[in-house]
Image: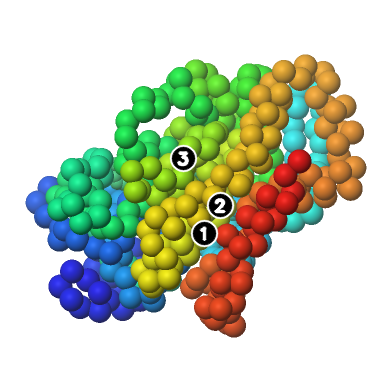
Amino acid sequence: MDNDGRTLAPNQGLQPDTLQGVPIRATKRGEERTPLPETYDVLICGASFAGLAVARELAGSGAEVMVVDRYEIGERQTSACGIPTDWLRATGLMEAERQRFDSLLIRMPHGTKRYRLPWTFSTFDYRELCELLWAGCDARFETAKVDGLSAPANGDGAIAVATDRGTLSAPLVVDALGWRRVLARGDGYQPPDAPLSRGLEVHPDGAGEKFEIWIDRRYVPAGYGWSFPARDEVRIGIGSFDPRFHVRETTELLAADLGRDRVGFQGNWIPHKLRPATEGGVFFVGDSAGHCLPLTAEGIRTALYFGIALGRELRGVVEGRQSREQAAVEYARFHDSHEWKFRWMLRVQRLLPRIPPRLLSPLLRALSAKRVVDWSFGHYMRIAPPIPAAGSAHDQHGADQEQRDADHPLRANRDLVEAEQP
Ligand SMILES: Cc1cc2nc3c(=O)[nH]c(=O)nc-3n(C[C@H](O)[C@H](O)[C@H](O)COP(=O)(O)OP(=O)(O)OC[C@H]3O[C@@H](n4cnc5c(N)ncnc54)[C@H](O)[C@@H]3O)c2cc1C
């Protein structure tokens, strides 16, 4: 239901304030940014991978869910949009796929190594993927800039959030706003001193066949470069584990080396360390909880994975099966159970730049045996394995609520992750 008591249809058709119909409206400006109604059952701040995954899990729960973002849904691409294909499949998002790869080419100063992957990787269209996620939601969306927490509302357990369209409040509030973690108490977490990597890419038009990364100090002393083709454009970028290294110049250098235009810049800080899952009653997910994997800077499937897990916990609250506090404990337990895997990835991230370049090629060659590749990529996938989400094709074609509960990542994956701990 919306704030006027009307039941909102699932977001399948045209929605005035969203991207459900093309052409897409630009973000509301000036006098269009009118004050919004104040109270909701669930307030989700951030409408990218993490926020939309949470909202989709709440569809059909009867909760009045408000999603806000400073931009329209899908308006600003936040990544190179590479993800294991199985994740697109499990979440019913295959339509957004642009290109698929069954091998990874690693280019080093002293050689090139091709790894045949045990699973395929896909690039996708950001706007289309966000639209597909949104189509599975029955939430309301508005553009609003979130400024931070406001004073607690009315002492009724609701959490108040200050935005440029007024104060919004709900008993269940999600921060899916990215690394800035806007709804946390300020803890001085700022680059370049915080554990954040730096990423920048260009998006020239053109086609390509190879899914490539560069481990080459000519481009970045600690980190890697990439070229991910996506049917009619190529996403070429540099990620530096060291936030002090400026990547603009070498992003341009890599694009120039590949004979591509240096256009369509897109970049951000990328967290490489987990942060608390909850704080002050707010739930954090995606980059705001540090869910991006160290070493590879893969943060999309983890944003979806933890978003699905959080959405299921919140659904338990709105359906009266648990309290907000119980949901917070369960979600934090799930998040914490993955900490050792993130820690290991961070160790390798720190080790990689210390390996002398001339040893890198023989080392990676030694690790390219099929069984080693299958083993390591299998473990890597199991950090955040594909989970069918609510509203996905898998879900619609057979999984009822009971089955979803049985598939619940908190039941299955947390136990698996804990059991695997060394
Ligand atoms: C150059 C680059 C390339 C990358 N490539 C990949 C890749 O190929 N594969 C991969 O898995 N990961 C990649 N990543 C990492 C990935 O982009 C992130 O981990 C992922 O986007 C996290 O999703 P999220 O939903 O948590 O946050 P985001 O996608 O960052 O979304 C945050 C949302 O919050 C909104 N927002 C922020 N502040 C406010 C505010 N104050 N008020 C209102 N709204 C606000 C933003 O508009 C945005 O919609 C890449 C990162 C970078 C920088």
Pinpoint residue 220: horizontal percent, then vertical percent. 61, 22
Would residue 78 be seen by someone viewing this image from the given angle?
A: no
* Residue topped by disc 2: 334
Viewed as shown, does residue 316 lie left or right of 172? right
Q: As rendered, which of 4 and 186 lies closer to the eye?
A: 186
* Residue topped by disc 1: 309
Pinpoint residue 341: horizontal percent, then vertical percent. 66, 41
Pinpoint residue 246: horizontal percent, then vertical percent. 49, 20
Q: As rendered, which of 217 and 144 lies closer to the eye?
A: 144
Seen at 18% across and 52% down, the residue is 155
Q: Earlier in the sequence, mark 3 or mark 2?
A: 3
Viewed as shown, does residue 395 lie left or right of 140? right
Pinpoint residue 55: horizontal percent, then vertical percent. 40, 63
Seen at 50% across and 35% down, the residue is 270
Quarter of the image with the C terminus is: top right
Task: Tell me which amino acid carries mark 3.
Answer: Pro
Q: Nearer the viewer, mark 1 or mark 3?
A: 3
Q: Residue furthest left?
A: 31
Q: Is residue 275 above or below residue 230?
A: above
* Residue topped by disc 3: 276
How packed mark 3 is, by other alpha carbons closer than 10 Å (few <14, some 14-19, many 20 or more), is some
Whether pointer 1 and pointer 3 mark residues with C-beta atoms closer than 8 Å, the reply is no
How packed mark 2 is, by other alpha carbons closer than 10 Å (few <14, some 14-19, many 20 or more), is many
Disc 1 is placed on an element classified as helix
Disc 3 is placed on an element classified as loop
Label 2 vs label 1: CA separation? 8 Å
Q: Nearer the viewer, mark 2 or mark 1?
A: 2
Task: Tell me which amino acid carries mark 1.
Answer: Ala
Q: As rendered, which of 349 and 328 lies closer to the eye?
A: 328
Q: Is residue 295 above or below residue 109?
A: below
Q: Earlier in the sequence, mark 2 or mark 1?
A: 1
